[in-house]
């Protein structure tokens, strides 16, 4: 946070997991812009994350902010896409795997799967989301009951945000099965999907559902890159 004469004139929000961090909503009040406060806030946020042992930092950049972020050392990663509307889900192919709402016994293998594809441990965030909206969840279980894919959702502005959705990078039928299993609880309302544009299959999935493209932003990264393959929909643009 930046202050001048006891007034808050700028702020930046930071979220961190074990190895990755996110910076979002870097805001400077209009009268104090073009004075270097945005760069000062970014420096402070990056230094705090590095001091906490964070190796990789992500953000979704506005066009106006990209020159500053590149100067600091951020590089372009991929387009973070937002889709929304009343979905028309494609029917999945016959799938021998069991599917149903996430249960407590699913959590260990679900969190292991998420860590594998997300590249970090966000257990507290995912468990909290599941506890808040247990019916808005689905797990795809393979041999021995091990979770091979999952989807979580939450209410938002008269509809739902679906995400994260995590499954094998080629398992589009598994993802269709997960979403169809939650359809009763989604209630035919509008949905939003935050889709990483690094892989064409999640984009294809969103377009199959007849969702409209709402917006996109440039995902930028400082530090070692983390693969987004297997992330079919993100939790949000602020924390992946």
Image (spheres, grey):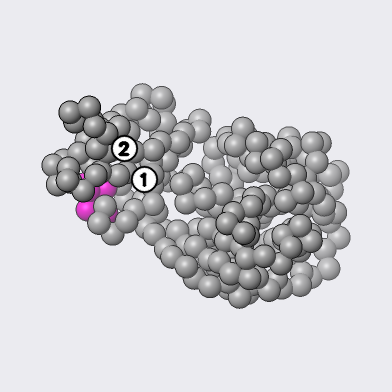
Q: Position of residue 5 (x, y in %)?
A: 17, 28
Q: Residue at x 47, y 51 (%)?
A: 237
Disc 2: which residue: 11
Q: Residue at x 38, y 41 (%)?
A: 23
> Between residues 192 and 150, which one lies in front from this camera angle?
192
Left-right relation of 71 to 88:
left
Left-right relation of 147 to 210:
right
Disc 1: which residue: 25
- For label 1, the crowd category at 10 Å Cα-Cα, with few meaning under 14, some 14 to 19 and many 20 or more, is some
Left-right relation of 180 to 15:
right
Residue 230 seen from this side:
no
Q: Position of residue 69 (x, y in %)?
A: 26, 47
Residue 173 sits in which quadrant? bottom right
Classify 25 as above or below 3.
below
Q: Earlier in the sequence, mark 1 or mark 2?
A: 2
The magenta span reads 66-71
Q: Position of residue 233 (x, y in %)?
A: 58, 56
Answer yes or no: do the residues labelled 1 and 2 have beta carbons within 8 Å? yes
> Between residues 165 and 186, which one lies in front from this camera angle?
186
Q: Does the segment drawn in magenta span residue 217?
A: no
Secondary structure of the residue carrying tag 2 is strand
Q: Position of residue 159 (x, y in %)?
A: 63, 60
Q: Does the segment drawn in magenta span residue 70?
A: yes
């Amino acid at each position: 946070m930046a202050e001048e004469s006891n007034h808050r004139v700028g702020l930046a929000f930071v979220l961190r997991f074990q190895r990755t961090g996110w910076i979002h909503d870097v805001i400077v009040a209009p009268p104090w812009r073009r004075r270097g406060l945005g760069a000062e806030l970014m420096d402070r946020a990056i230094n705090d994350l590095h001091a906490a042992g964070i190796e990789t930092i992500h953000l979704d950049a506005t066009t106006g902010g990209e020159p500053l972020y590149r100067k600091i050392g951020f590089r372009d990663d991929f387009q973070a896409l937002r889709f929304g509307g009343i979905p028309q889900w494609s029917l999945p192919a016959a799938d021998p795997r069991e599917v149903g709402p996430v249960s407590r016994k699913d959590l260990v293998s679900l969190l292991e799967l998420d860590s594998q594809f997300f590249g970090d441990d966000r257990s507290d965030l995912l468990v909290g989301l599941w506890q808040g909206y247990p019916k808005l969840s689905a797990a795809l279980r393979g041999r021995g009951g091990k979770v091979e894919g999952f989807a979580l959702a939450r209410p938002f502005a008269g509809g739902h945000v679906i995400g994260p959705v995590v499954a094998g990078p080629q398992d589009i039928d598994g993802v269709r099965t997960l979403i169809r299993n939650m359809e009763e609880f989604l209630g035919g309302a509008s949905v939003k999907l935050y889709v990483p544009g690094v892989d064409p299959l999640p984009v294809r999935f969103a377009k199959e559902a007849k969702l409209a493209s709402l917006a996109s932003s440039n995902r930028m990264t400082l530090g070692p890159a983390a693969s987004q393959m297997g992330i079919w929909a993100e939790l949000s643009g602020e924390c992946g």
